[in-house]
Image (cartoon, helix red, strand yellow):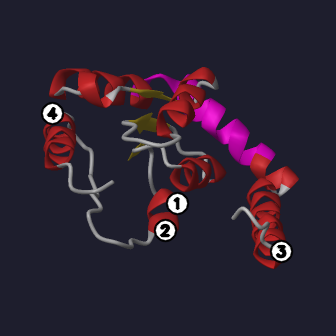
Amino acid sequence: MNGLGHVYKTILEAVGKLSDVQVILSIVRTAPQIELLERARLCITHAGLNTTLESLAHGVPMVAIPIAYDQPGISARIAYHGVGEFVDLDSLSVTNLSELIRKVLTNRSYADRARYFKEVIAKTRGLDVAADVVERVLQETSTAPLSKNA
């Protein structure tokens, strides 16, 4: 999903309007995301499932900018559950993004809801269970015989 330079530029301009905020913009293939989330007050994300779950597992609220695939649906769930807000790519502007960032950072309900989900995930081992299910399904489909029509 990388390569949308205007999105990165908009994010940098939007956060540039905020004081006492340190921004880490990852445009590399890999970054120490967990370590960054452990110190973060907010995650600006494309709403990929991994980043969303990892943010929740660390109690970090989000502002989502969905790009493709399941990301619009995940963004809607982020807003529905009160752990963040989202802006559609077509509506993205410095003004509306900075407003959403301020809203999520200043309204304690977002951080409170994110911390609630952090507790739920920790108690239920949510990420471990999800990973186990994915691994089991992948093993089952890789060992299943192919049908004649495949």
C-alpha span from label 2 to label 4: 25 Å
Instruction: Give the number of the disc on residue 38.
Output: 1
Q: Which quadrant does the C terminus fall into?
A: bottom right
Majority SS type along the magenta span:
helix
C-alpha span from label 4 to label 1: 24 Å
Which tag, 4 or 3, sits closer to the chain's start?
A: 4
Which tag, 4 or 1, sits closer to the chain's start?
A: 4
Q: Nearer the viewer, mark 3 or mark 1?
A: 3
Residue 110 shown in magenta: yes
Task: Please name the amino acid that badge 4 sits on.
Answer: Lys
Instruction: Give the number of the disc on residue 145.
Output: 3
Which residue shows up at 47% across the image and 22% down it? 107
Which residue shows up at 48% across the image and 43% down it? 69
In the visual, does 84 lie left or right of 6?
A: right
Instruction: Give the number of the disc on residue 17.
Output: 4
Task: Please name the amino acid that badge 1 sits on.
Answer: Glu
Horizontal and vertical percent position of residue 65: 36, 36
Which residue shows up at 40% across the image and 44% down it? 46
C-alpha span from label 2 to label 1: 5 Å
SS label for mark 2:
helix
Q: Nearer the viewer, mark 4 or mark 3?
A: 3
Contact flag, marks 2 and 4 (Cβ < 8 Å): no
C-alpha span from label 4 to label 3: 57 Å
Contact flag, marks 2 and 1 (Cβ < 8 Å): yes
